[in-house]
Image (cartoon, coloured by chain):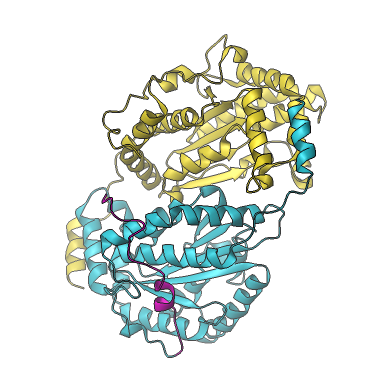
Chain colours: A yellow, B cyan
Amino acid sequence: MPKKHGAKATSAAAIGNAVRVKPGFVLSDVDPRSTPGYAGSKKDSVGAMDASRAEIDDLQERLYAGGRDGDGPSVLLVLQGMDTAGKGGILRHVVGAVDPQGVSIHAFKVPTKEEREHPFLWRIRKQLPPPGNIGVFDRSHYEDVLVVRVHDLVPPKVWRRRYAEINSFEESCNDKGIHLVKVMLHISPQEQRARLAERLDRPDKYWKFNPGDIDEREHWGDYQEAYQAVLDKTSTDENPWHVVPADHKWYARLAVHQLLLDKLRELHAPWPPADFDVAEQQERLAAT
Amino acid sequence: MPKKHGAKATSAAAIGNAVRVKPGFVLSDVDPRSTPGYAGSKKDSVGAMDASRAEIDDLQERLYAGGRDGDGPSVLLVLQGMDTAGKGGILRHVVGAVDPQGVSIHAFKVPTKEEREHPFLWRIRKQLPPPGNIGVFDRSHYEDVLVVRVHDLVPPKVWRRRYAEINSFEESCNDKGIHLVKVMLHISPQEQRARLAERLDRPDKYWKFNPGDIDEREHWGDYQEAYQAVLDKTSTDENPWHVVPADHKWYARLAVHQLLLDKLRELHAPWPPADFDVAEQQERLAAT
């Protein structure tokens, strides 16, 4: 690893604003190979992440400490993207850099029979992060207006009302102190083909491959349309979406790292004060 | 960080055997400042952990891949120790180095009313790691023969039969493919005093301090006796205990890292074979 990076690294501070979805946003205008808000190189990005490691550790520990009494804020990172978009890499390299005691990851798979018998938010509510924690959703309630819409798994009148349901659900999360960071990892179909090809080239990657992934490629346009609808209808002032170009894995990792850092800075809290007399306890301890 | 370490680092391979509890083991004979099975320095230990990082990553991913079909093995790291023994540091620095997607950590606190209305293993069973995962228990079912015994929270005839119940419970875990790594972090009362004093000296550590921690120090001898009983009665051939001297945090981290590595090596599995025709899928993909 190069040694010169770190303090000197190009700033990633502008990424958050650059990837935030604003009114009139058009998904197809975003180049999945671009690196919005960041002028540095891949090498710079490693330095930039290393440079804020100590700060993110401190902020995360403050968040965690604040949750100890059961009512502090929490963070919920929602990760969406087409297959191979790099959610796993984000979990490993970005979320994995944070103290695991304060992190809870949940991967939402195809709903079980029990889950399908409940409203679509039922299984989501059960996985919301407790105070002080950083929760991560690897896929989420948005699948219920993405795969479900593309494959007509419920009638249109059902999925159509879900956007509004999602918005009020997310507001109710905010009311509980849950701060969402919503990220769509945006890759190109060409990059997806290359990543799937790699899974088929390497026996240590076979287990990640599913023939159904190729079938899904035929619905690429429908998925982009469904994502556009998500971005149009559920990117609110309180809970905006971030579309992170993800053909460059290094950029996607840096961007999500930065989004998490921005949110933690926003929540920056003082250390919880002592709820005991410090001097008295010091005396008691010395006597043991 | 020094650069010469890594390949050249002193080997940690002998730690596992050195800390394993064998018949006739006497806890009070273990010096909490010792570093059994390891001749290296603190700096060497960092190099030793870095040197096996890629291997542990590979082994953990194989474990995780093997769990995808719902019936592979899993690992369960059980962490016990007196307050301030360093469980949090192990979670952060050892467990935190592993891909968080395949890790599930559960901290067992004072049982809730609902938990107390069930047999003591009820809440434990619910947190067992699924196939492919590394589960970590921060405290565990052993609290039910430690704090419970020391403070007479149930009648002696109840806690006395728990040792045998624990042994058969753990065997039933083995039958399900759950491989336990049981670790007691062993600190001295002097080191605990220093660590508690630090929590009282630093406002960023107040939140970790509880006046009850000082009260518990009066029961130090009782706890050591209760731990000795645990080691006598529940260190079996299949599920042995490891007593890791923990006054030196760096040694404790290296030791638990090594125990985890040893277990993953033991479980080393080939990558799951493709359950599809690779060439056929490559052709299909190329056509998209």
Q: Whole-percent x and y of residue B86?
A: 35, 62
- Work out whether residue A14 or residue B2 is closer to the camera in this orientation and state it: B2
Q: Would you say B221 lies left or right of A32 here?
A: left
Q: Going by the picture, which residue comes out furthest to the bottom?
A: B24
- Work out whether residue A176 or residue B170 is closer to the camera in this orientation and state it: B170
Main SS class of the magenta portion in the image? loop
Where B182 falls versus A21 (above or below)?
A: below
Identify the residue at image location x=16%, y=65%.
A283
Q: Whole-percent x and y of residue B225?
A: 38, 84
- Work out whether residue B204 or residue A206 is closer to the camera in this orientation and state it: A206
Q: Would you say B185 lies left or right of A93 here?
A: left
Q: Going by the picture, which residue comes out furthest to the top?
A: A24
Snapshot quadrant of residue A98? top left
The N terminus of chain A lies in which quarter of the figure?
Answer: top left
Q: Whole-percent x and y of residue A134?
A: 47, 41
Check if residue B8 falls in the magenta segment.
yes
Res. A117 visible in picture: yes
Res. B210 visible in picture: no
Q: Which residues are magenta?
A: B1-23
Snapshot quadrant of residue A263? top left
- Work out whether residue B180 or residue A252 is closer to the camera in this orientation and state it: A252
Q: How many discs mark residues in the rendered view?
A: 0
Check if residue A26 falls in the magenta segment.
no
Where A86 falls versus B245 (above or below)?
A: above
Q: Whole-percent x and y of residue B32?
A: 29, 75
Identify the residue at image location x=42%, y=62%.
B257
Identify the residue at image location x=54%, y=26%.
A246
Identify the residue at image location x=36%, y=60%.
B48
Snapshot quadrant of residue B247? bottom left
The C terminus of chain A lies in which quarter of the figure?
Answer: bottom left
